[in-house]
Amino acid sequence: MDIDSYDAGDAVEVLEGIHLAQLVAGDRASVQHFRIEPRAIVDTHSHEHEQLGFMNRGELVFTIDGEEQIVGPNDSYVIPADEPHAAENRSDDVANGIEVFVPPREIPPWVEGGET
């Protein structure tokens, strides 16, 4: 068994106001923590990973197929692999939570030498 501890200093600002930290990666899934500052935007993108998330604090507006869906505290969500999606924090509060990626992002794209 591998054990790792999260420290807020582990997060990397991958876009303006978007902070991500790889928590752990196994053979079949990886887990990351996200913190999204007020008014920050994650532009439309897609990836091979199925993305499962849990919103711990705050609120995000996800846009998928032109439809907006609000995810708030204690909400969970699933974004299928290869599904174009975007997210935006339109509130005045920080949004944060945990996401699981299947297959794992062994080296996330924001780490030097990571996947694209």
Image: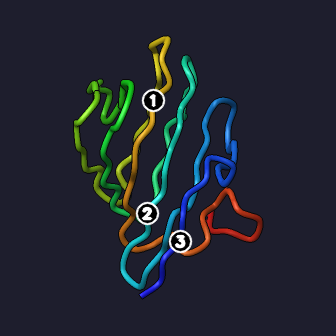
Q: Between 30 and 80, which is closer to the camera in this rendering?
A: 30
Image location of residue 74, percent across then percent down: 23, 36
Query: Mark 2 belongs to which amino acid?
Result: Val
Residue annotated with mark 2: 31
Query: Mark 1 belongs to which amino acid?
Result: Ala
Quarter-wise, where is residue 6 in the image?
bottom right
Q: How far apart are marks 3 and 2 (CA)?
A: 11 Å
Image location of residue 77, percent across then percent down: 24, 45
Q: Nearer the viewer, mark 3 or mark 1?
A: 3
Query: Mark 3 belongs to which amino acid?
Result: Asp
The kind of secondary structure element at disc 3 is: loop
Lateral position of residue 80 relative to residue 89, left or right: left
Residue annotated with mark 3: 4
Image quadrant where one finds the C terminus: bottom right
Sequence-earlier tag: 3 or 1:
3
Lateral position of residue 33 relative to residue 76, left or right: right
Q: Distance between the residues labelled 1 and 2?
A: 17 Å
Quarter-wise, where is residue 27 in the image?
bottom left
